[in-house]
C-alpha cells in the first residue's frame, strides 16, 4: 500500500518524523511536501496533492495529512472524490478505529499542535492496521456519501 503524506508549516516537523517511521514499517511513503519549512505556506497547496493521489487510487493508497488542528486540512481533502478523511487531534484512539471500521477512511488528518510525535506515530500505526468491517450498513452509508462526489 502506498502512503502519501503532506502538511503545512504547523505539521512540518511531525511529518518528517512520520515519514521515517512509515519507512520502518512495510509501507511505501511518498512525501507530497512541503520540502522545507516556510511559516507562510498554505495548507491547501500540499494537502490537495495528497488528496489527489488518494482520490485517483483509493483502493491501494492512503493519505496522512498534518496541520495545526487538522480541521482545515480535512476540509480540503474531503472535497476530492473517493476521499474519506477523518480527523485526529488526541484523546481517545477509539475514534481512529471507528473511522476505519465504519467509514473506511482512506485519509487521516492529524492536528499536530495537539499531539506529540509519539502519539502521532501510535495513531498512524493503529489507523493503518485497522480494517474496514465490510458490514452492509456501512457500505450502504458510504455509497450514499459517494453520491455527493
Image (cartoon, helix red, strand yellow):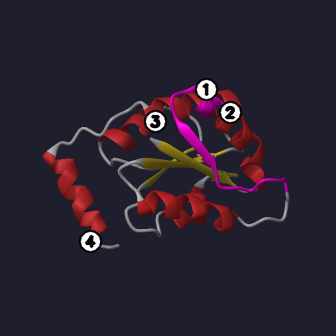
> Answer yes or no: do the residues labelled 2 and 1 have beta carbons within 8 Å?
yes
Report how far apart the C-alphas of labels 3 and 1 lie in the structure: 16 Å
Q: Which residues are magenta?
A: 20-37
Q: Secondary structure at mark 2?
A: helix
Evaluate whether residue 65 shows in this view: no
Residue 86 % position (x, y): 47, 50
Name the residue tied to disc 2.
Answer: 20
Give the distance between the C-alpha atoms of the residues marked 1 and 4, in whole angstroms.
Answer: 37 Å
* Disc number lying in front (2 or 4): 2
Q: Which mark is residue 127?
A: 3
* Nearest to N terminus: mark 1 or mark 4: 1
Residue at 21 percent of width and 42 percent of height: 134
List x then y, in percent, for residue 44.
64, 67
Per the model, the C-alpha gap separating discs 3 and 4 is 25 Å
Image check: 52 left or right of 111? left
**Residue 65 drawn at (x, y percent):** 60, 51
Q: Secondary structure at mark 3?
A: helix
Q: Is residue 17 visible?
A: yes
Amino acid at each position: 500500500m502506498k502512503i502519501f503524506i503532506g502538511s503545512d508549516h504547523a505539521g512540518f516537523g511531525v511529518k518528517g518524523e512520520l515519514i521515517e517511521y512509515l519507512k520502518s514499517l512495510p509501507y511505501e511513503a511518498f512525501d507530497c511536501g512541503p520540502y522545507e519549512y516556510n511559516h507562510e505556506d498554505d495548507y491547501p497547496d500540499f494537502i490537495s496533492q495528497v488528496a489527489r493521489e488518494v482520490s485517483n487510487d483509493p483502493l491501494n493508497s492512503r493519505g496522512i495529512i498534518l496541520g495545526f488542528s487538522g480541521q482545515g486540512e480535512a476540509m480540503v481533502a474531503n472535497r476530492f472524490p473517493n476521499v474519506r478523511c477523518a480527523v485526529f487531534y488526541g484523546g481517545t484512539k477509539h475514534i481512529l478505529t471507528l473511522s476505519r471500521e465504519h467509514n473506511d477512511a482512506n485519509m487521516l488528518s492529524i492536528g499536530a499542535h495537539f499531539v506529540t510525535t509519539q502519539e502521532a506515530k501510535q495513531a498512524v500505526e493503529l489507523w493503518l492496521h485497522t480494517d474496514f468491517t465490510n458490514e452492509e450498513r456501512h457500505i450502504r452509508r458510504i455509497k450514499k456519501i459517494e453520491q455527493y462526489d
